[in-house]
Image (spheres, rainbow, N blue to C red):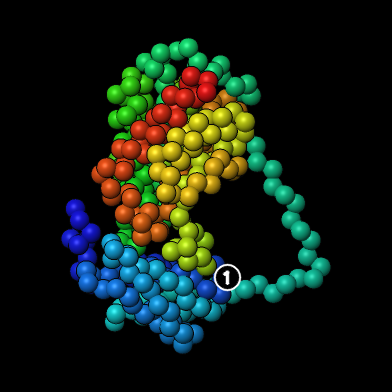
Amino acid sequence: MTFAALLATVTIVFPPEGAKLPAINRSYVMGAAEDGESSLVVSSLTSRVSSPAFVSRTGAWATVVDVKPGTNVVEIGGVRRSFTVAPIAPANPIARAEPKKTYTKLPYAADQAKPHPKGKKPEEITVVLDAGHGGHDGGALSPHGLPEKDANLRLAKAVRAELVKRGYKVIMTREDDTFVALYDRPKAAHRANADLFVSIHHNAPGYATNPLAVRSQSVYAWNPLGERLAKAINVRMAAADPSLPNEGVLHANFAVTRNPEIPSCLIEADYITHPDGEAATWDAVRRPSIAAAIADGIADWVAGK
């Protein structure tokens, strides 16, 4: 399916109609325009400020508008969208800083790491792939309205195909548009006595950040066990697409990474909110290339590199 087939008119994808946003003073607005448009103007009817939205080659556009607490309305190409912004809480001069939260390991994970599978044949190694989000949990949205959950599943299936071709045993936490509870995802690796767990996602910026200004790839881990796996994958992904900024291996207290027993990491393959990042998720040539890079990273980790 081409982008042209997806476009009928100017659309606003984010914020969704009736969305409730946190206490912010500006928000990105994002959508798509029919072929032939080069630039648009998004009007914030609340703040009486208009912002240019330059249209990408795919028809995707994004910009940032000022917002206020309460109901806000934006308009572009005759399309209006209303959403609410939470009020900014007044500062409390005697409030104490909340103690830093301590994140603990998954309750069902063992305290000791499994032996590294170096020396094992691929057919002796079990990989659990987790396509992030699913069902009613769509994740982030692209300018054309592609849910992150779909992009995650497409890439996860491509990674599975690459790993299976090399002989690995692969278990998917979901194979269709099904909701899987957060803590059930790493539990699949625990039940299967897997050798590693990889969660696949696509990123999105905070509400007040312009999506046109943010695009990168990264891999998250919680402990040294996961960091070694994350690094091996990240190096290969960076080499597969040198044009995409690479943030490297980052620390995160995600539920799917807090496993001291099974090496676990979470991949943010791209920013789905960036027009080029969205286009990359549709690219039938690039997707197998990134999938192969992830599989190469897993193979490097297995080999102890």
Q: Nearer the viewer, residue 126 or 136?
A: 126
In the rendering, at what x and y percent does residue 114 appear?
56, 19
Vertical placement of 46 versus 137: above or below?
A: below
* Left or right of 305 in this view: 128: left
Q: Residue furthest bottom?
A: 48
- Whether residue 188 can be seen here: no
* Residue drawn at the location 39% of the way across and 30% of the way down: 295
Q: Nearer the viewer, residue 139 or 300?
A: 300
Vertical placement of 75 versus 277: above or below?
A: below
In the rendering, at what x and y percent does residue 159 appear?
35, 33
* Left or right of 17 in this view: 221: right
* Residue 17, picture quadrant: bottom left
* Residue 299, picture quadrant: top left
* Residue drawn at the location 35% of the way across and 33% of the way down: 292
Give the total number of marks visible in the rendering: 1
Q: Nearer the viewer, residue 260 or 241?
A: 241
* Residue drawn at the location 58% of the way across and 43% of the way down: 250
- Whether residue 171 can be seen here: yes
* Residue drawn at the location 52% of the way across and 23% of the way down: 305
Q: Mark 1 belongs to which amino acid? A: Ala
In the rendering, at what x and y percent does residue 48 appear?
46, 87
Crowding near the residue tagged with mark 1, few <14, some 14–19, many ≥20 C-alpha atoms within 10 Å:
some
Q: Secondary structure at mark 1?
A: loop
- The residue that mark 1 highlights is 23
Vertical placement of 74 versus 187: above or below?
A: below
Q: Residue furthest right?
A: 94
In the rendering, at what x and y percent does residue 67 appear?
51, 78
